[in-house]
């Protein structure tokens, strides 16, 4: 006995996956641990308590989004979890090095 299963996909193509926060590429002037005093002060000015993080994570400072390749990032290219637009590029959270 042969059983065939099929599923209908609207418009014949699968949906495009949504971008998850950690896929945001940033060009940061510096990347420091969340225990760094400068990062704590900047975060505090933005209303963020880095000391409440469950572990030490890398914090990007002076960041701007990388929107096109090739990138002219002359600093540190990173992928970050949480750069808030309202932070004006001052900080991004959990920034891991990436290769462009």
Image (cartoon, rainbow, N blue to C red):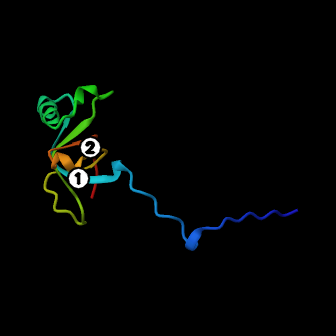
What's the distance in space between the residues labelled 2 and 1, CA to CA? 8 Å
- Residue 70 sits above or below residue 46 on the image: below
Q: Of helix, strand and loop, which one carries label 2?
A: loop
> What x and y, as percent, mark residue 94?
28, 40
Residue under the image location 23 percent in, 66 percent down: 70
Q: What SS does tag 1 mark?
A: strand
Rendered location of residue 17, percent (x, y): 46, 59
Please indicate whether residue 1 sits to the left or right of residue 66 in the image: right
Classify 10 Å Cα crowding around label 2: few (below 14), some (14-19), many (20 and above).
many
- What residue is at 22 percent from the left and 50 percent from the top? 85
**Which one is nearer the viewer's eye here, 63 or 74?**
63
Q: In screen coordinates, is 21 left or right of 27?
A: right
**Which residue does the numbered mark 1 point to in the structure image?**
26
Q: Which residue is rendered at x = 33% and y = 27% of the image?
A: 54
Q: State if disc 1 and disc 2 touch (CB < 8 Å).
A: yes
Image spot of residue 67 (x, y percent):
24, 62
Residue 88: image tag: none
Q: Does residue 3 appear to the left or right of 43 in the view shown?
A: right
Say which residue appears at 24% left-offset and 26% top-offset: 51
Q: Which image quadrant is residue 72 in?
A: bottom left
- Residue 66, by quadrant, is bottom left
* Rendering quarter of residue 99: bottom left
Residue labelled with disc 2: 95
Residue at far right of view: 1
Task: Report whether 17 appears left or right of 60.
Answer: right
Q: Is residue 66 above or below residue 63?
A: below
How busy is the neighbourhood of tag 1: few (under 14 within 10 Å), some, or many (20 plus)? many
Residue closest to the eye, 78 or 7: 7
In the picture, the quarter occupied by the C terminus is bottom left
Q: Of marks 2 and 1, which one's residue comes earlier in the chain?
A: 1
């Amino acid at each position: 006995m042969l059983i065939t299963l099929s599923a209908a996909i609207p418009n014949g193509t699968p949906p495009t996956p949504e971008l998850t926060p950690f896929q945001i590429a940033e060009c940061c002037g510096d990347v420091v641990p969340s225990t760094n005093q400068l990062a704590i002060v900047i975060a505090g000015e933005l209303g963020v308590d880095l000391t409440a993080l469950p572990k030490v994570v890398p914090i990007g400072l002076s960041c701007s989004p990388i929107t096109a390749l090739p990138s002219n990032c002359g600093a540190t290219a990173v992928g970050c979890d949480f750069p808030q637009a309202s932070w004006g590029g001052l900080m991004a959270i959990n920034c891991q090095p990436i290769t462009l």
